[in-house]
Image (spheres, grey):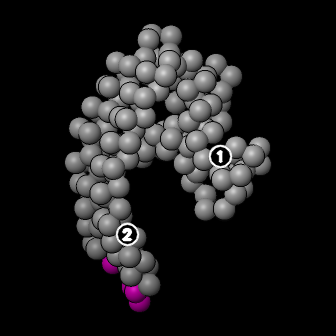
Amino acid sequence: MFGFVIGILCLIAFFSVLRGRRWGRFGGYGCGGRGGRFGHGRGWLAYRAFETLDTSPGQEKAIRGVLNELRKSFGELRPELEATRAQLAQTIAGEQFDAATFEATLERQAASLGRMAPLASRALAQIHEALDPDQRRRLARLMEKGPGYYAL
């Protein structure tokens, strides 16, 4: 069960990289930020990934559409994520650590992510279908090596 949660989080991270989202909240710092170190805009990482995969404009449009739908679906989890964070903070702030509350909170979160698994699976299947075998191999290598790896 825990491996499934890690897998979903890896998918979220991958899709965030493809759409050019940075994990940090440091204004314009880093490659993917607004006016980042290289002067590129927010979509630079997605552009770079598409360039690395050598996608056609039609493929890019299809993949961006899939990722936008997936982002909307995962965006619906935001209130649950915020509630989880608040509950965990209360658990930490208590006089004694309440393991039962902590575990129940994590189980609720895992169930929420579990509901997203079919959507993520369908999105990945659509991306798989949009790419040719060589592009799939490159994408697999990119996913395996991480977001900073572009020498495919």
**How many C-alpha atoms fall within 10 Å of the one at disc 1: few (<14), some, or many (≥20)?**
some
Marks 2, 1: nearer the viewer: 1
Mark 2 touching mark 1, by CB under 8 A? no
Per the model, the C-alpha gap separating discs 2 and 1 is 28 Å
Establish if 15 lies above or below 72: above
**Badge number at residue 82:** 2
**Badge number at residue 141:** none
**Badge number at residue 41:** 1
Establish if 132 lies above or below 105: above
- What is the residue that sits farthest to the front in this orientation? 57
Q: Give the range drawn in magenta.
A: 94-98
Residue at horizontal 51 percent and vertical 41 percent from the top: 19
**The C terminus lies in quadrant:** top right
The answer to whether any part of residue 8 appears in the image is no
Helix, strand or loop at label 1? It is loop
x, y percent for residue 124:
35, 29
Please state if 101 lies on the left or on the right of 151 as rendered: left
x, y percent for residue 76:
30, 57
Q: Does the magenta stretch include residue 96?
A: yes
Going by the numbered disc 1, the residue's amino acid type is Gly
The image quadrant of residue 106 is bottom left
The image quadrant of residue 58 is top left
- Magenta segment main secondary structure: loop
